[in-house]
Image: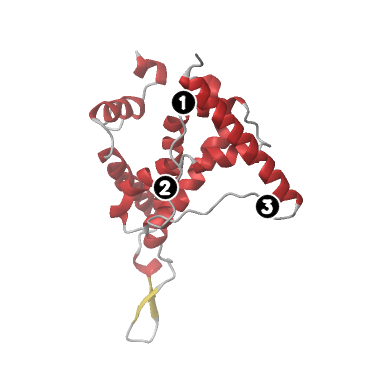
Amino acid sequence: MMDFNKLKVKGFVIKYRLFVIRNKIRRFLGLGSSMPIFYVGGPDMLPPPLSNEEESYLLAHFDDKDMDVRTILIEHNLRLVVYIAKKFENTNVNIEDLVSIGTIGLIKAINTFAPEKNIKLATYASRCIENEILMYLRRSNRQKLEISIDEPLKVDWDGNELLLSDILPGDVEGVHKKIDEEVDHQLLKEALKKLSVREKRIMDLRFGLTGGEERTQKEVAD
């Protein structure tokens, strides 16, 4: 009797080949690939995650030029993007914007994933998705804090504008650096809240977050 998992993968392979053929026809007709658009909270359900066997098959047949495999891997990992994006709902950023940014991280993960490193795609993609969102939030917070040093604050009795640069200390670069450090510190605090105790410990040992020395990955593993 044929193993059920093998039968399931065989069925998936047939569907995948049909998908490739359909996309080739669409591209030949100038219609582009048939990757659908999904909206968070919309009527269309996101595709389910791939099984280990399906994912292994796709990764084994994936290269940088295979748009069909990339499309399938992206579609079937969108639930992961939504799951991670929802962790940042308290940042006052629209959830659909977070999902869009997270999807960029997912695409980067799929483009750079190396199966030979013996790490799961979902694990690697989660890091890339979260990093992409954190970088976006960091940029957004910096933009909110940015004020031109030539910003006029008020006018004195003689009609002269009082500029921000007039009341800042001479080391303007030092002020910008301090602001950047504070933004980084706040983002790091928010990110650490989402980690388990073990993950926090690993981050602390690796980067010396609580004042200790930074350690190599090997030292942390030991």
Residue bearing the label numbered 3: 32
Residue bearing the label numbered 2: 133
Residue bearing the label numbered 1: 52
Specify few, some or many for label 1: CA neighbours under 10 Å numbering under 14, 14-19, or 20 or more. few
Specify few, some or many for label 2: CA neighbours under 10 Å numbering under 14, 14-19, or 20 or more. many
- Amino acid under disc 1: Asn
Give the structural element (helix, strand or loop) at label 2: helix
Q: Which mark is residue 15?
A: none
Mark nearer the N terminus (3 vs 2):
3
Give the structural element (helix, strand or loop) at label 3: loop
Q: Nearer the viewer, mark 3 or mark 2?
A: 3
- Amino acid under disc 3: Gly
User: Is residue 61 toward the left or the right of residue 106 in the image?
Assistant: right
Q: Position of residue 152 (x, y in %)?
A: 39, 75
User: Is residue 27 toward the left or the right of residue 190 in the image?
Assistant: right
Of 41 and 184, the residue lying toward us = 41
- Amino acid under disc 2: Ile
